[in-house]
Image (tube, helix red, strand yellow):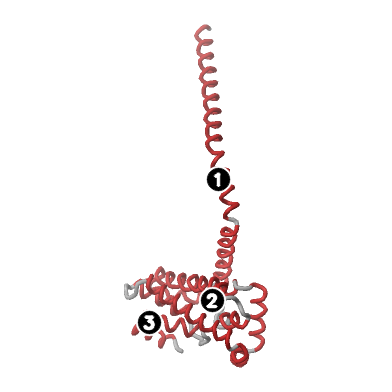
Amino acid sequence: MTSQFLINIIIQYGYVGLFMIMAITILGIPIPVEFILTFVGFLSFRGQLNPVIAILFATTGCVSGITIAYLLGLFFQHKILINLKKYAGGSRIKKVFSWYQLHGGKLLTVGYFIPGVRHLSGYIAGMSKVKYREFALYSYLGAILWTTPFIMLGRILGSRWKTLLPMIHHYALLFAILVIIFCVLLYLLYKNHEVIMLWFNKKLSHLPRCYFSLVKRRFLVTMGGLISISLFLILMGLI
């Protein structure tokens, strides 16, 4: 599909067109989605689309597409595997499978940012018999983390969005790494939130004592200084 054709769909059908484009690209049809998302952000800059509603429809389209892919992989594993090897290549399928075994559900989140992987991850999650709860957690989170930045970036860039788009593609992998780091930090924060809260409460309980201790020290230093100055003045007066 040409970019101009996709732009015409967005202009003519708005949010519904955006939903359909996002759904079918996740199912495996090669579409320059970053281009479309950034263009949608540009339309929101011009006031033709609401950015929040656009993000909602784009994310819902991704969620719908990857859920269909997951169910197809889950219930039609053999047929899906044959078709994936035919159209995507056996070596690529093997590589994505190895990545999935190494990183698990996290690949569902990061895979959106890697062309070729986002078209396969839903099917592979289904073929790997991943529980729906784990699949939904990582894949739906990845959908909103993928669509939101590109739409907001197009809105921020305004009329310059098309000029800077090649740079966006060039640093897409770097952006994916940053997303991984962000997700890992969120996970660690969630997993260790009890320890963090205990540490915070402990520090908070020591704060009044430290404060009063500091006030006491400052009072003693001030009084000592005043006494020293007074004695010095008295001594100078006697002299």
Can residue 170 be seen in this snapshot?
no
Q: Give 136 or 25, whichever is nearer the viewer.
A: 136
Q: Give 187 or 229, whichever is nearer the viewer.
A: 187
Q: Mark 2 points at which residue?
A: 112
Question: Residue 120, located in which quarter of the rendered image?
Answer: bottom right
Q: Is residue 152 above or below residue 218?
A: below
Mark nearer the viewer, 3 or 2? 3
Q: Residue 182: where, in percent of width, then height? A: 55, 63
Mark nearer the viewer, 1 or 3? 1
Can residue 191 be seen in this snapshot?
yes
- Neighbor class of circle 3 (other Cα within 10 Å; few <14, some 14-19, many 20+) is some
Amino acid type of the residue that numbered disc 3 sits on in the rendered structure: Val
Q: In this view, does 235 lie above or below 225?
A: above
Secondary structure beneath dot 3 equals helix
**Comes first in the chain, label 3 or label 2:** 3
Residue sitting farthest toward the top: 238
Residue at screen point 58% across, 80% down? 121
Q: Residue 162: where, in percent of width, then height? A: 43, 77
Residue sitting farthest toward the left: 47
**Comes first in the chain, label 1 or label 3:** 3
- Neighbor class of circle 2 (other Cα within 10 Å; few <14, some 14-19, many 20+) is many
Q: Name the residue under label 1.
A: 201
Secondary structure beneath dot 1 equals helix
Q: Residue 204: where, in percent of width, then height? A: 54, 42
Q: Residue 239 carries which label?
A: none
